[in-house]
Amino acid sequence: MSKVYITRPLAEEAMAMVRAAAEVRVWPEPEAPPPREVILQEVQEADGLLCLLTDQIDAAVMEAGKKLRVISNCAVGYDNIDVAAATARRILVCNTPGVLTETTADLAWALIMAAARRIPEADRYLRAGRWRSWSPQLLLGQDVWGATLGIIGLGRIGQAVARRAKGFEMRVLYTDVTRHTQAEQALGAAFVPLPELLRQSDFVSVHTPLTAETHHLIGAAELAMMKPSAVLVNTSRGPVVDERALAEALGEGRIFSAGLDVFEEEPLPKESPLLVLERVVLLPHVGSASVATRTRMARMAAENLVAGLAGRRPPYLVNTEVLPSC
């Protein structure tokens, strides 16, 4: 029977699927990833690995796991896996694409609204007993209705965010490495270069993958192009935004507010300058955290793993060149 290591407990439905197909070992802590030395030890006897985006699966892990045939990532992104190293060893790499599009778009909108109207700040204000009376100048925010939304990366999630903007009668701008002409027509979105998007947008929502080119795509120079009344939201990958530059811009009032679900280092360090700022909404990477979506993600990851172990082509295979004729 095949042996599998799972780096975090998942939905029971998915765990049962894997247990029916393999001998399973699981890291028991639901909120903390296994240390690297544990992964290196556990993969030594494993035919399959079901991991999360918090697990760095590099060539050293694959070298330790000489029996590995499948690495199934319970995530859409897979920048935590050295795909080239896996392909060289003919290890299948799988992900869970498409499953979290609408859920993450909902979360992006939650951040847009919360940051625009200063919701967490107002909640803290009330709970601290500081509210004395209705006041015409109390906790003034920014209007969303009729504003301009700039989307960086018009992929699945970016398009889902743009669809929701129609309900607020927003003008939608976007920038991407490629034009999406069909989406432009369907969504009424206009393509503009990044500097123009930053200058014109009241809200900037980041939905680009993390690559060498997008690392610190939003830095000090880009933040300086934004309106003082603008709101920045990031639900993509933390390193796309230079957090130190963002903290400085927020602290100096050069942009109005921000909403972040992802960070350059996760969990966010206790010494992060973002933690002392009022006008930033900070979430612990919960973009896909709905019951239905997380269950579906786990099931997809399990399906990929079980198929690969059985010698079948996984439904969501990243490095297709490993099985070119299947």
Image: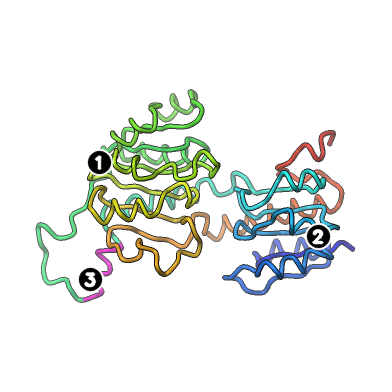
**Residue plotted at (39% across, 64% down):** 272
Image coordinates of residue 251 in percent, x first then y, are 26, 57
Q: What separation in Å lies between label 2 and label 1 (alpha carbons)?
A: 51 Å
Q: Secondary structure at mark 2?
A: loop
Q: Amino acid at mark 1?
A: Lys
| Residue closest to the eye, 88 or 199 | 88
Q: Which mark is residue 65?
A: 2
**Residue plotted at (34% across, 45% down):** 220
Quarter of the C terminus within the rendering: top right
Image coordinates of residue 298 in percent, x first then y, are 66, 58
Residue occupied by mark 1: 227
| Residue closest to the eye, 257 or 101 | 257
Magenta span contains residue 162: no
Which image quadrant for residue 250?
bottom left
Q: Amino acid at mark 2?
A: Gly
Rate crowding at label 3 as few (under 14), some (14 to 19) or many (20 or more) other CA atoms within 10 Å: few
Mark 1 or 3, nearer chain start: 3
| Residue closest to the eye, 154 or 224 | 224
Above or below for 158 versus 288:
above
Above or below for 274 versus 214:
below
